[in-house]
């Protein structure tokens, strides 16, 4: 490959774009975390509650796989959520040796409060954008979802 190789330029351009997207996403994620109330649930517990709220009841092993943590870590997270009455555990009707974890109403309210607070900040921050910028941001969010699923 020479310096005038279009494929090399394309690869370098994609790598630079990937860096910029990663940095922007990370900065926004940090800012959204900063908008959470101090003393609220840990990010791991919120992630599990959010998954239960979105995807419905699941076994602890399925939650561990989905969240990419060890089964032991997930067992601790689930137990803390149960202790806080944000989740509950029932026997799996298909396999009595397994347990199904489901979100409680209190857990659902906790997730909704957390989301509402961060979305309120984001909506306020977006008021400084033009209509075109907001449309572009919504399109970008959809593309980021596609990337996350790949």
Image (spheres, helix red, strand yellow):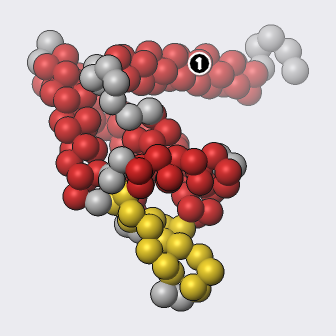
Q: How busy is the neighbourhood of tag 1: few (under 14 within 10 Å), some, or many (20 plus)?
A: few
Q: Nearer the viewer, residue 27 or 16?
A: 27
Q: Is residue 146 left or right of residue 108?
A: right
Image coordinates for residue 76, horizontal then vertical, percent = 57, 48
Q: Is residue 145 left or right of residue 98?
A: left
Residue 136 in view, yes or no = no
The residue sitting at 22% across, 58% down in the picture is 105
Image coordinates for residue 37, horizontal then vertical, percent = 27, 23
Q: Is residue 57 above or below residue 81?
A: below
The residue sitting at 20% across, 48% down in the picture is 109
The residue sitting at 32% across, 20% down in the picture is 38
Image coordinates for residue 142, horizontal then vertical, percent = 36, 43
Looking at the rendering, in which quadrant would you find the N terminus?
A: top right
Q: Quadrant of residue 116?
A: top left
The residue sitting at 41% across, 55% down in the picture is 82
Image coordinates for residue 60, horizontal then vertical, percent = 56, 62
Q: Nearer the viewer, residue 92 or 56?
A: 92
Q: Quadrant of residue 121?
A: top left
Total numbered badges shown on the rendered structure: 1
Residue position marked by numbered label 1 in the rendering? 19
Q: Is residue 148 above or below residue 140?
A: below
Q: Is residue 17 left or right of residue 127?
A: right
Question: Disc 1 on helix, strand or loop?
Answer: helix
Residue 105 in view, yes or no = yes
Q: Is residue 149 above or below residue 14?
A: below
Q: Is residue 125 above or below residue 44?
A: above
């Amino acid at each position: 490959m020479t310096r005038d190789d279009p494929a090399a330029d394309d690869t370098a351009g994609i790598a630079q774009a990937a860096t910029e997207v990663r940095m922007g996403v990370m900065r926004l994620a940090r800012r959204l975390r900063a908008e959470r109330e101090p003393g609220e649930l840990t990010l791991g517990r919120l992630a599990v509650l959010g998954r239960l709220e979105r995807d419905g009841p699941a076994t602890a092993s399925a939650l561990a796989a989905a969240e990419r943590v060890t089964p032991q870590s997930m067992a601790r997270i689930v137990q803390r959520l149960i202790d806080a009455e944000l989740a509950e555990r029932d026997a799996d009707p298909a396999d009595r040796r397994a347990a199904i974890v489901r979100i409680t109403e209190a857990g659902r309210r906790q997730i909704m409060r957390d989301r509402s607070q961060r979305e309120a900040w984001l909506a306020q921050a977006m008021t400084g954008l033009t209509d075109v910028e907001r449309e572009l941001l919504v399109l970008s969010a959809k593309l980021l979802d596609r990337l996350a699923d790949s």
